[in-house]
Image (cartoon, rainbow, N blue to C red):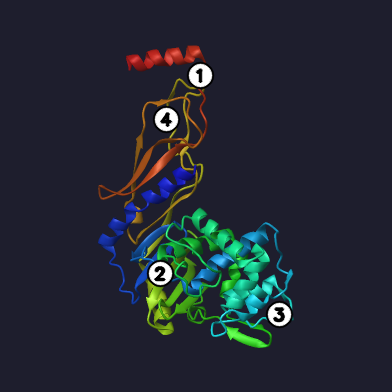
Amino acid sequence: MKKLFAAMAASLLLISAAQAQTVPAPNIAARSWTLLDASSGQVIASQDANMRIEPASLTKVMTAYVVFDALRDKKVSLDQMVNVSVDAWKVDKSSSKMFIDPKVPVSVKDLLYGLMVQSGNDAAVALAEAVGGDVNTFVTLMNREAQRLGMKDSKFANPHGLPSPDNYSTAHDLALLAQAVIRDFPEFYKIDSVKEFTYNRIKQQNRNRLLWMDPTVDGMKTGHTDASGFSMIASAHRPNGTAGERRLISVLSGATSDAMRTAESQKLLNWGFQNFDTVKLYSKGQAIATPEVWKGSKPTVKIGFPNDVTVTVPKGVAGKLKPVLERKDPLVAPIALHGQVGTLKMMVDGKPLLVLPVVALEEVPQATIFGRAWDSMRLWLK
């Protein structure tokens, strides 16, 4: 099943070439960037998105993901009080902090706000110790989740993103992570839209300036180090015609200033919303055909897709999409549930825009020995 989903994701890459011919990518003042449509899972445009970068405080998005997972599994709770260690309190005093105190326990909830709103490196260490028992164990959890999410070019060495040669990622991988946070933990993702947070009588503003500039932006995180420059993950959701809403996620690294990363992230999001549409082609379990089955306990099988099929296309292209189904005929039982039985090509002006694997939506066991013999004779005469 996982291989099938990977194949479906890979097939969407065919869209990139077609898009590039119709909608030129914007000029973005950053070393590496990508724009992902979270609704379809497609990369709309990118530049050096697989280049290794220093994620800086964007690392905290993975820290938050692991904590959210622990909350869901009830390993910790939002109101759980955490004793602040000396290590958490002493973490790089020149870096961003929420100013927790070893003498004062702090709740997991406050630590999460300190992590994502105030970008507190001390909060990151305290959360890592609360969930993992110690920082090293927590980092192991971070890397395990990164691999599970398909972040093949990422490695984390700490929970806060302070410089380390063993702490690296890519714009592409960070977009996958951002998508996973929004998809898997929407109730916790809301923290990212909070504009300011006060702890220990110290009020700090969220460094994501787009929260003030664009009401459709509701996250996610900024980062900065001298080596990496200014980085940002931003996400916005806007109306998608009659099809509800669509969400875009931008990731950029290597901007020269806070103002530049903000302006370029806004430019990237606006370009994506203005030039592309997200279209739902098929629903999960929708039968697109019911072909004949040979040597099976059923005469036919319903075929389609195991998940909703949503694609992102340049504006004006959706009405030109023409499906062409290619089956692996003859279909001979046994046929497994979700076994691939063909492909569906979505054509535009006679050229394939994308190719999707088509699967069996039901299991078809073999027929009796007499049924198989009869169909063998029929196939021979066919």
Tell me if 33 is positioned left or right of 208 in this view: left
Q: Name the residue under label 2.
A: 53
Amino acid on which the number 4 mark rests in the picture: Pro
What amino acid does circle 1 point to? Ala
Q: Tell me where residue 267 sits by quadrant.
A: bottom left
The residue to which callout 1 is attached is 367
- Image coordinates of residue 52 in percent, x first then y, are 39, 66
Q: Which residue is under mark 4?
A: 291
Asked if the residues shown at circle 1 and circle 2 are in contact, with their CB atoms under 8 angstroms apart, the answer is: no
Of callouts 1 and 2, the N-terminal one: 2
Separation of residues labelled 3 and 2 (CA atoms): 33 Å
Name the residue beneath numbered marker 3.
102
Give the structural element (helix, strand or loop) at label 4. Answer: loop
| Among numbered discs 3 and 1, the one appearing first in the sequence | 3
Q: Are marks 2 and 4 in contact (CB under 8 Å)?
A: no
- How crowded pointer 2 is (Cα within 10 Å; few <14, some 14-19, many 20+) is rated as many
Q: Does the rendering let one see residue 313?
A: yes
Classed neighbour count for the residue bearing mark 3: other residues with Cα under 10 Å, few (<14), some (14–19), many (≥20): some
Q: Where is residue 98 in the image (x, y as percent from the top left)?
A: 62, 81
Residue 293 at what x, y percent from top left? 44, 25
Is there a contact, CB below 8 Å, between mark 3 and mark 2? no
Q: How far apart are marks 1 and 2 (CA)?
A: 56 Å
Q: Which of 334 and 152 is in front in this view?
A: 152
Mark 1 or 4: in front is 1
Residue type at mark 2: give it.
Ile
Check whether the beta carbons of the residues at disc 1 and disc 4 lie within 8 A of each other.
no
Q: Nearer the viewer, residue 80 or 37?
A: 80
Residue type at mark 3 is Pro
Q: Please, what secondary structure does the residue beneath circle 3 have?
A: loop
Residue 216 seen by the camera: no
